[in-house]
Image (tube, grey):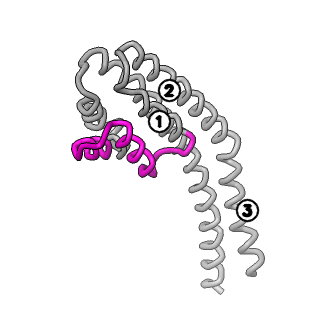
């Protein structure tokens, strides 16, 4: 009898945990989009203050604690050191980075086509436009989390309870 009760509690916990994981995935998406938006602003500042090559700018960004989870920054540098062009290396790296939300990938690909191909003011404008788009995605992701986050948690718990009741 005790084993049966423990098993049912475990089933309820598993359902609850799965709901929490889906909810957390929504929250993480929002956090990553905010970091990408902030990265665009940081890149504008670094370009204006330091200048330098695009490879050096990526290195500076990657070495910042806030952005070192973005593997595409380091991967782009590695591909460029193997004589890939920036735009090709950027696109390959973004496609391979599973940390990025799918909504942001297209914005970043367009950015890769335009960075390094124009003067400083044009590049800052492009970065600003990308930042605005990413900020918009961040706000939508935040609203989605508010709407669906608790729902996912409750549904997971309910599924756990329903499964436990059915197994009784």
Element under disc 1: helix
Q: Which residue is mark 2?
A: 130
**Which of the two residues, 52 or 68, is positioned nearer the viewer here?**
52
Please tell me the numbered disc located at residue 158: 3
Left or right of 58 on screen, residue 99: right
| Residue at 36% in and 44% down | 72
Magenta highlight range: 74-103
**Is residue 97 shown above or below 30?**
below
Q: Find the distance from the CA under tag 3 to the CA under tag 1.
A: 39 Å
Determine contact: label 2, label 3, CB under 8 Å: no
| Residues at marks 2 and 1 touching, judged by CB atoms closer than 8 Å | yes
Disc 2 is placed on an element classified as helix
Left or right: 27, with 117 as reference point: right
> If you read the primary sequence from the N terminus, does the residue marked by circle 2 or circle 3 appear first?
2
- Identify the image quadrant of the N terminus: bottom right
**SS at badge 3:** helix
**Which residue is labeled 1 in the image?**
108
Residue under the image location 24 percent in, 43 percent down: 83
**First in sequence: mark 3 or mark 1?**
1
For the stretch drawn in magenta, what is the main secondary structure?
Answer: helix
Most distant residue in the bottom direction: 1
**Spatial distance from mark 2 to mark 3, Cα to Cα?**
40 Å
């Amino acid at each position: 009898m005790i084993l049966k009760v423990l098993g049912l509690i475990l089933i309820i916990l598993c359902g609850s945990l799965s709901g929490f994981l889906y909810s957390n995935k929504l929250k993480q998406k929002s956090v990553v989009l905010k970091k990408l938006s902030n990265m665009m602003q940081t890149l504008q500042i670094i370009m204006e203050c330091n200048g330098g090559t695009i490879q050096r700018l990526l290195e500076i960004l990657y070495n910042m604690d806030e952005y070192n989870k973005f593997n595409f920054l380091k991967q782009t540098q590695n591909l460029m050191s193997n004589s890939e062009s920036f735009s090709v290396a950027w696109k390959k790296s973004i496609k391979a980075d599973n940390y990025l939300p799918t909504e942001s990938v297209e914005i970043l690909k367009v950015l890769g086509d335009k960075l390094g191909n124009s003067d400083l003011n044009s590049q800052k404008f492009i970065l600003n436009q990308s930042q605005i788009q990413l900020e918009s995605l961040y706000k939508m992701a935040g609203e989605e989390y508010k709407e669906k986050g608790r729902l996912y948690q409750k549904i997971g718990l309910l599924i756990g309870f329903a499964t436990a009741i059915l197994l009784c």
